Image (cartoon, coloured by chain):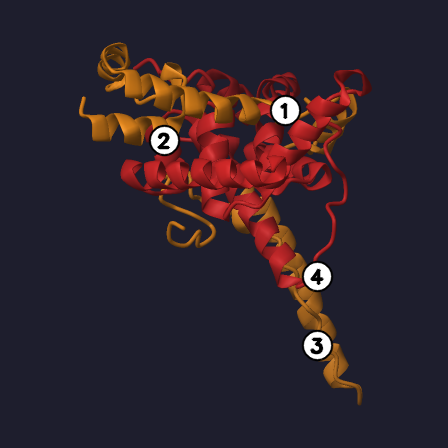
Chain colours: A orange, B red
Amino acid sequence: MTPERFRQIVEAYGAVPQRWPIRERAAAEAFVGQNAQARDMLAREADLDRLLDAYRVTPPDSALTGAIIASIPSSRRSSWTYLLKGLGIMGAGLAGAIAGAFLTMTYTPSVPTLIDEDERPIFTSFDVNVSEFDLGETQ
Amino acid sequence: MKSNDPDEALLERVASGDKSAVREMVARKLPRVLSLANRLLGDRGDAEDVAQEVFLRIWRRAGRWQRGEALFDTWLHKVVLNLCFDRLRQRRDTYVIQPPDRQDPGPGPDDGIAMREERDAIKAAIDALPDRQREAIVLQYYQDIGNIEAAAIMGISIEALESLLARARRNLRTSLAGDRS
């Protein structure tokens, strides 16, 4: 453990060894035992840790838990169900558009997309690099 | 082969349509999901909306889960992160600065003014961090996620994660020192 690496670890992960990278933890802890400056650095980071600990979030209450459970559909519809329903509505929209063509008014129905992004088969194992959003570069 | 994912058996039950498994999944994961979304968004109402969306996604996708190298919990954190990022982007797109809809109540009335002030100060400092620094510190510090997993969730290297964490802590220290002076 070099002084520079110890500084990087503590500045990134704070003063509690349990939060340090597991592979370097023992070496970093041994470094603290031999170095007074390292202990000063730890004390400074421990002050920030104590402040961070003050930011507690109220745990979920039973109303939220119940609302979430109630929002889950009672039966699972397959992607085919969504697809068929989507096609049905698209068909109805198309029929309406054709009928509308015989009228002087032009009517263009918007076709809802019932196959939402969640229905895409992305679960071919978990790929953390697949993001639905561009999270950008590091800041 | 036996899975090392502690959530996999429960996920299989959710996939089979077992409503009791859904309740168990909500009980097991909601506190962490809400804690993450609350700290990323700084708004309780938005965080609860995200939590609801997350569990709908679990329900919809559970049947297509395939055992991989990453844990279900890692995927879960990634989904929360993406949903929160989307909400933050929508907020910015409105170009209107509004106070959050609903603050987290935080400590109760018996917890003392000093404790509440301290909590409000650290919350404000975390809210003011750049998005990626806030994500890094919330994942690593508050969600107690290891560095390898946190870097994977954020899609960055461990070195980049450490850089974000160090900058986040430096900014927090500066911001909180300013509050005290």
Q: Nearer the viewer, mark 4 or mark 3?
A: 4
For the residues beneath circles 2 and 4, the answer to whether they share a chain is no
**Residue at numbered disc 2:** A11
Q: CA distance from mark 1 to mark 4?
A: 28 Å
**Host chain of mark 2:** A
Q: Residue at x 52, y 18 (%)?
A: B10
**Host chain of mark 1:** A
Q: Residue at x 30, y 36 (%)?
A: B158
- Taking the view exactly as shown, the residue that stands out farthest to the bottom is A104
Q: Are marks 2 and 4 in contact (CB under 8 Å)?
A: no
B48 or A72: nearer the eye? B48
Q: Nearer the viewer, mark 1 or mark 2?
A: 2
Rendering coords of residue A51 (x, y %)? 56, 25
**Residue at numbered disc 1:** A56
For the residues beneath circles 4 and 3, the answer to whether they share a chain is no
Kindly identify the amino acid type of the residue bearing the numbered disc 4.
Answer: Val
**Residue at numbered disc 4:** B96
Q: Residues within 10 Å of mark 2 (few under 14, many from 20)?
A: many
Kindly identify the amino acid type of the residue bearing the numbered disc 3.
Answer: Thr
**Residue at numbered disc 3:** A108
Kindly identify the amino acid type of the residue bearing the numbered disc 1.
Answer: Arg
Q: CA distance from mark 3 to mark 1?
A: 51 Å
